[in-house]
Amino acid sequence: MPLTTREAALEQLAPILPILRDAILGGWNEYREQPVELQLKYTPRTRANAVRDLILDRVRVGVDGMPGVKIVKARGLDLLSLLGDTLQLLIRFKKLDRNKLASSYPTMQAQLFDLQLPLEGVPTATRLSAGYQLTKDQGDIAGIFVTCQVGAHLAWDIDVLQETSTPVVELPLSPAIAATLSLPVSIKVDQKKTKESKE
């Protein structure tokens, strides 16, 4: 099966990008609300698994009832399936490294998933990762992306925060407001009171 292009995937993903963004931010924030002493007990792998489960819970709620969109379980993986007219995408949820590649222990299953090779029990589709990068201190989310990787190579990515941001539009000012803003501002100082306050 040929790999889906970024443009085709973005068109199909556009309606759910806000859901993915909110689920990832919400899952991370829910994890961070746990007591610090509990967070300190987690290994990076345990933390990533806990955050993934919190994200999945939010995604399930967010896509509930959407046509052609559902969570499927395949080979122990919880995957978001998007079935379009000519295109199927399968998305897993992962922590991403600094190169935007999914952080996975290199099992045979993980390697076949990443290589986009047939995997028994997993529907034929372009396999993507929706994930987050952390700041250097691991204390916050630095970015959210949907990525398509082939092995250890990033084929393309979608910056979810950029795609879901509301553009800032500069509106022209009315002539009356523009005239008001260009007036010089003057402050009247009562010389007598200023002199008295100095004494």
Image (tube, rainbow, N blue to C red):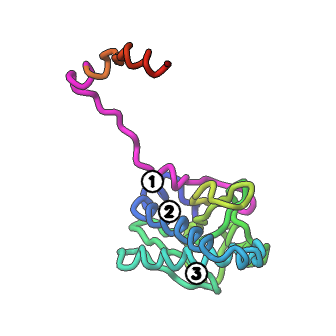
- Find residue 21 and name its label: 2
Residue at horizontal 66 percent and vertical 76 percent from the top: 35
Residue 59 highlighted magenta (yes or no): no
Give coordinates of residue 165: x percent, y percent. 45, 50
Up the image or down, 1 lies above or below 135; here it is below
Label 2 amino acid? Arg
Report if the CB atoms under discs 2 and 3 are less than 8 Å apart. no
Q: In the rendered view, does 192 fall on the left or right side of 76?
A: left
Mark 1 packing: few (<14 Cα in 10 Å), some, or many (20+)?
A: some
Give coordinates of residue 142: x percent, y percent. 63, 54
> What segment is highlighted magenta in the picture?
150-179
Residue occupied by mark 3: 78
Gap in Å between the C-alphas at discs 3 and 1? 24 Å
Residue occupied by mark 1: 164
Report if the CB atoms under discs 2 and 1 are less than 8 Å apart. yes
Q: Nearer the viewer, residue 51 or 196?
A: 196
Residue at horizontal 71 percent and vertical 79 percent from the top: 38
Gap in Å between the C-alphas at discs 2 and 1? 8 Å
Q: In the rendered view, does 120 fall on the left or right side of 25?
A: right
Q: Earlier in the sequence, mark 2 or mark 1?
A: 2
Residue at horizontal 54 percent and vertical 59 percent from the top: 4
Q: Earlier in the sequence, mark 2 or mark 3?
A: 2
Up the image or down, 158 lies above or below 1; here it is above
Query: Circle 2 — which element?
Result: helix
Q: Nearer the viewer, residue 30 or 14?
A: 30
Query: Circle 1 — which element?
Result: loop
Mark 3 packing: few (<14 Cα in 10 Å), some, or many (20+)?
A: some
The image quarter in which residue 158 lies? bottom right
